[in-house]
Amino acid sequence: MDMAASDGPTLVNLPSNPVPEGGRVAMLETRDRVRLRYATFPRIGEVNRGTVCLVQGRSEFIEKYFETIADFQKRGFHVATFDWRGQGGSERLIRNPLRGYVESFEDYWQDLASFHATVLLPDCPPPYYLVGHSMGGLVSLIAATRDRLMFDRVFVSAPMVALDRQLLGMSGMARLTEAFCFAGAGRLPVRRRADELPSAANFEGNPLTSDRARYLRAGEVLAAAPQLRIGAPTYRWSASAFEAMAAAASDGFPASLKIPVLMLAAARDQVVSSAAIEQLGLRMRTGRHMMIAAARHELFMENDAIRAQVLAAFDAFITEQSEN
């Protein structure tokens, strides 16, 4: 293993997961003084199609998306990405660095807005396209309701707009988890299978991907750089997430989306609700949704056949649009 960049923040470079061509890594400080690790990657080839701003799911990190970043580069896109506060190589927010924590989902919006102002606008070629997965997909949808000038289009993979098997619904679960926080449990963990460290022992039946090599690759990065890992979310994070999902289920949310959106749902998703994604897609005025058959939650980490469908959808919605 070696690390890209000799001083300051680094990118983990493994033979099974090499740093994409031209990668540069640095730190930025958000408006509320949280330090985020970010990286930029130049386009490959003569065609300039602008910049993909890639935002991850909960507990993820820049290195997990190296393969996908290279796919975007080859299409003529500059890529800019960062680790959310509290995870990856960014500043951790509470004493126990393994627990997923955020005060409010508004803080993630702060991360994205700071990244847009500090890195995208001064350093990256327009137009700007926002690509988000899971939790990052929900934050991307929130961004689409806030400022129609930040991004030209939004492409989201399995966005976390709701969770299945929640008896009280998103609003009820927000109130319940907020009550736990009020009782002093805000920094205690909420255990979930999806938060297990990827390994050969727990690949079978995992809810994330059917692709063994890509599943184990994430574990190899974390074994090489355990400081990138976080485990279970806290009750404070959960309360914030349920509140944000409840807002996405409100009657006025679809009409508040100001820019074109394409949402991809995984037909075999056990992490977020594909039915809720479908319902939101049917209500949107500026967007639509697609269901990817046989796919599990991590669409960009799925097998080659499923990834081909995901990238074909990306091409139809963003690559071809950037040529017009």
Image: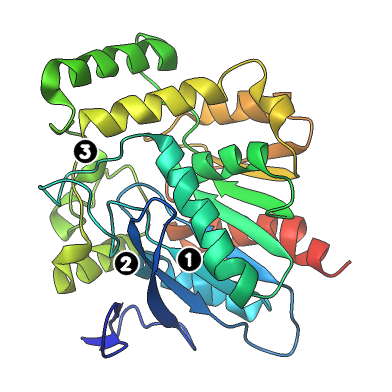
User: Which percent across, then down, holds residue 140?
Assistant: 56, 45
Q: Earlier in the sequence, mark 3 or mark 1?
A: 1
Q: Secondary structure at mark 1?
A: strand
Q: Please indicate, yes or no, whether residue 181 appears anywhere in the rendered image.
A: yes
Q: Please indicate, yes or no, whether residue 292 appears anywhere in the rendered image.
A: no
Instruction: Give the quadrant of the C terminus.
Output: bottom right
Q: Is residue 124 above or below residue 266?
A: below
Residue 206 left/right relative to 37: left
Mark 1 is surrounded, within 10 Å at the Cα level, by few (under 14), some (14 to 19) or many (20 or more) other residues, namely many
Residue 111 left/right relative to 76: left
Do callouts 3 and 2 mark residues in contact (Cβ within 8 Å)? no
Q: Check disc 2 and give the amino acid type.
A: Ala
Question: Comparing marks 1 and 2, which lies closer to the viewer?
Answer: 1
Q: Earlier in the sequence, mark 1 or mark 2?
A: 1
Instruction: Give the quadrant of the N terminus.
Output: bottom left
Question: Comparing marks 3 and 2, which lies closer to the viewer?
Answer: 3
**Residue topped by disc 3:** 193
Question: Comparing marks 3 and 1, which lies closer to the viewer?
Answer: 1
**Residue topped by disc 2:** 213
Q: Earlier in the sequence, mark 3 or mark 2?
A: 3
The residue sitting at 26% across, 41% down in the picture is 194
Is the image coloured rainbow, by chain, by secondary structure, or in one colour? rainbow
The residue sitting at 43% across, 45% down in the picture is 108
Q: Check disc 1 and give the amino acid type.
A: Thr
Q: Nearer the viewer, residue 158 or 94?
A: 94
**Residue topped by disc 1:** 81
